[in-house]
Image (cartoon, helix red, strand yellow):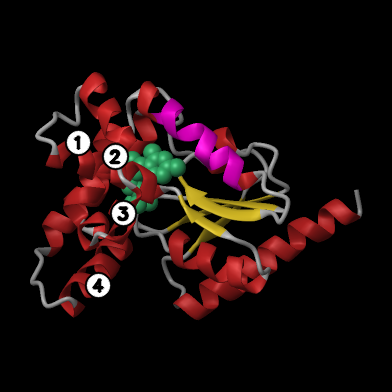
Amino acid sequence: MIIAVDGPAASGKGTIARALAEHYRLPHLDTGLLYRAVGLSVARAGGDPDSQAEALTGCHFDESIFSDPELRSEATGALASRVSIHPAVREALVKRQRDFADQPAGAVLDGRDIGTVIAPHAPVKLYVTASAEKRAERRMLELQQRGLNPDFDALVADIRARDDRDMNRPIAPLRQAEGAALLDTSDLSIEAAVRQAIALVDAQLEGQRQG
Ligand code: C5P
């Protein structure tokens, strides 16, 4: 069984995907980390993330980058969103994601184009979203817990800019895949969002059993 989870930054899709993987005992891939790895590698090599040719060199990243704490920073998220608009970069990362999705055990993948491009054949699809303000609030709490003091308006602006880039790029834009169940987490606790996600997955599976 493949579960495709898509949605914008800080919508809760990562937490939900991890919880679904645990609940259904499936391996999980956070595909955003691949784009982050490319963005961070390019920046560290002094390359320009907006140049397709230079961004492409970042696709040969060393696997050790996945344990680098900088991979999960806001700055790396923005770099990821810049390199991810290049078709050649997306193409270079497709096989790894499809191989993960198609492993015999099944899988949960979360990202922006899982239900539309990577695994359109996934029997279960979720589109997780939340208002930009709620997402900025969550980011703010997360950063405060790490001892930082972020500016709320700047966080909202960053989130809107990332949404705009992800939703309006010509290749694999972020959108709700056909057949994907919508889960708006704006007013939900993590526990409630996970409960609803499991209920939506079960409903899609049940719908398929009944043909
Ligand atoms: O999910 P995360 O915030 O880690 O993703 C970072 C960026 O990587 C996103 O803003 C998006 O531009 C890009 N991305 C993508 N396709 C995916 C996953 C992430 O374009 N499947």
| Amino acid carrying mark 4 in the image | Glu
Mark pair 3, 1: CA separation:
15 Å
| Mark 4 lies on residue | 142
For label 1, count other residues whose C-alpha is less than 10 Å away and answer few (under 14), some (14-19) or many (20+).
many
Could you tell me if the residues under marks 2 and 3 are in contact, i.e. CB atoms within 8 Å?
no
Prevailing secondary structure of the magenta residues: helix
Determine the residue positioned at 84% across, 51% down: 208
Q: Position of residue 195 (x, y in %)?
A: 60, 75
Could one spot residue 114 in this view of the protein?
yes
Determine the residue positioned at 46% across, 65% down: 185
Is the CB–ligand 1 distance for label 4 below 8 Å? no
Could you tell me if the residues under marks 3 and 4 are in contact, i.e. CB atoms within 8 Å?
no
Give the mark, 4 or 2, whose residue is nearer the N terminus.
2
Give the mark, 3 or 1, whose residue is nearer the N terminus.
1
| Mark 3 lies on residue | 64
| Mark 2 lies on residue | 38
Q: Viewer-proximal residue, 162 or 110?
A: 110
Mark pair 2, 1: CA separation:
6 Å
| Amino acid carrying mark 3 in the image | Ser
Q: Mark 4 against mark 2, which lies toward the viewer?
A: 2
Residue farthest right in this picture? 210
Judge from the rendering whether residue 76 lies leftward or rightward of residue 14; answer left or right. Answer: left
Tell me the element at label 1: helix
Could you tell me if the residues under marks 2 and 1 are in contact, i.e. CB atoms within 8 Å?
yes
Q: Viewer-proximal residue, 69 or 116?
A: 69
| Amino acid carrying mark 1 in the image | Val
| Mark 1 lies on residue | 42
Mark pair 4, 2: CA separation:
24 Å
